[in-house]
Image: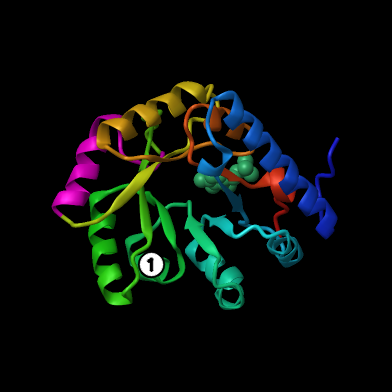
Amino acid sequence: MTDLYPNSIDGIAAARAEILTRIAKAAKQAGRSADAIDLVAVSKVQPDDRIDAMLATGQRIFGENRVQEAQGRWSDRREACPDLQLHLIGPLQTNKAEDACALFDVIETLDREKLAGALVKAMEKTGRTPRLYVQVNTGDEPQKAGLTVGECVAFVKHCQSDLGLQIEGLMCIPPVEEPAAPHFALLAKLAARAGLEKLSMGMSSDFELGVRLGATSVRVGSALFGERVKA
Ligand SMILES: *Cc1c(COP(=O)(O)O)cnc(C)c1O
């Protein structure tokens, strides 16, 4: 078994090398190039020493699910590391849209009309234009964020034509108790229908499946850093 708490630089580097190898293998099986797949290292809740160890491996793409937590973790590191790419992968409140635009390079959780409007304003105000993904609630789960499957394509078109937002791709988080494959396949189909090429799908437990079904980025936390330890 691998170390669940890879605190040393070696442990972190080995975990990352293993994930990259598994991504490359899954890509090859699917006849895809591994270069077409970004590894987003999900650093939420992780302590500073693990973050710095991950940076030392050369990893530059990180995912966070809360704006405020990400500001604390990345504001200074971002200055020291200009090629950093930060992805917001958690729900965004409209009153945090400006902070999110100021910090993040990619916002993966555009999931409603009101937020689209807030992002238009926030981009004008901050002069920054993070790349955007529309989140789709592929399981049509009542409490989960994301556009319904039925609304998704029209929402993408609306953002593009009426609001002038550039949408880069789609993102989903399948229901935990269901096999992920049909959800990933559905997301790929919706993206094709919307004319989008990027797909953010797959986490620690199912990123290889995501890659086989067309993911262009996978969001991996615990398999890279070890289990999240609550403070
Ligand atoms: C936490 C989180 C992940 C990473 O989860 P792991 O199972 O630790 O890989 C991926 N995506 C989202 C949206 C998350 O909130």
Query: Residue 190 falls in which quadrant of the image?
Result: top left
Residue corresponding to mark 1:
101
Image spot of residue 195 (x, y percent): 27, 37
The residue nearer to you, when weighing 163 against 71, is 163
Query: Residue at horizontal 24%, vertical 36%?
Result: 153
The quadrant of the rendering that contains the N terminus is top right
The residue nearer to you, when weighing 26 against 151, is 26
What secondary structure predominates along the stretch shown in magenta?
helix
The residue nearer to you, when weighing 28 against 186, is 28
Q: What residue range appears in magenta?
A: 144-162
For this view, does 90 lie left or right of residue 96?
right
Element at label 1: helix
For this view, does 180 lie left or right of residue 189?
right
* Residue furthest out toward the left: 162
Query: Is residue 126 something that shows in the picture?
Result: yes
Query: Residue at horizontal 45%, vertical 64%?
Result: 104
- The image quadrant in which ligand 1 is located: top right
Hey, what amino acid is under mark 1?
A: Cys
Residue at disc 1, CB closer than 8 Å to ligand 1: no
The quadrant of the rendering that contains the C terminus is bottom right
Query: Residue at horizontal 68%, vertical 60%?
Result: 58
Image spot of residue 97 (x, y percent): 35, 65
